[in-house]
Image: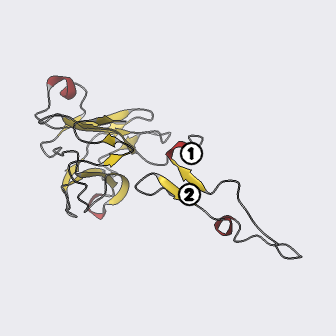
Amino acid sequence: TVTLDATGNGSITAAQVGSASTDNCAIASMSLSQTAFNCSHISTATPPTDLFISEYVEGSSNNKSIEIYNGTGAAVNLTTGGYQIRVFLICLTSATIINLAGIIADGDVFVVSNTLANAAILSQSDQTSGSISFNGDDAVALTKNGAAGTFVDIFGSIGTDPGTAWTQSGNTTLDRTLR
């Protein structure tokens, strides 16, 4: 397993892959055909083991929402799983917490929107909260297990000030919908 960093890049070495390799005559050398990885290398062959943030809507004014996707193969009860959305405003490591309630069927999404979003956004919402209030420079996390807060997915970098927005390869999070 290669873990990608916040920029979507990761790498491995032959020693990491073959650390348990043995040979009666000693291993002369080990190499890998590929050592660098990015988001384009993510495999969809294995279903996710947990929920993830599938859409981030950072529109003008209160037009904000977070969409969560369930591809786990089974329905997930957000209430009994203690799922929460945590909004970390610029540079803060403490969050505003939104407890999620409901069930997401396998292959379905759950949308949490700002209470004052426009009618088009609210019509797609499963839950609303005045605390869904972020601007392209805040971190948003999906956690489970209630107060224990096991992180499931994170958008942005907690405790970091990216300026006016998170930017990657010319793309920005300010006033954008990201999927």
* Lower sequence index among marks 1 and 2: 2
Measure how far apart labels 1 and 2 are at the Cα level. Answer: 10 Å
Residue 25 in percent (x, y) is at 89, 76
Viewer can see residue 47: no
Q: Is residue 113 above or below residue 119?
A: below
Position of 86 with respect to 43 (left or right) is left
Residue 48, horizontal then vertical, whole percent: 50, 45
Indicate the quadrant where residue 177 lies.
top left
Asked if residue 13 lies left or right of residue 146, the reply is right
Q: Is residue 150 above or below residue 179?
A: below
Q: Label 2 amino acid?
A: Val
Label 2, on which residue?
2
Q: Residue at label 1? A: 41
Which quadrant of the rendered structure holds the C terminus? top left
Q: Residues within 10 Å of mark 1 (few under 14, many from 20)?
A: few
Q: Nearer the viewer, residue 46 or 166?
A: 166
Residues at circles 1 and 2 in contact by the CB criterion of under 8 Å: yes
Q: Secondary structure at mark 2?
A: loop
Can you give x and y, in whole percent of width and height, for residue 136 in the image? Answer: 23, 45
Q: Quadrant of the N terminus?
A: bottom right
Q: Measured along the vertical axis of the image, is residue 57 above or below residue 52?
A: above
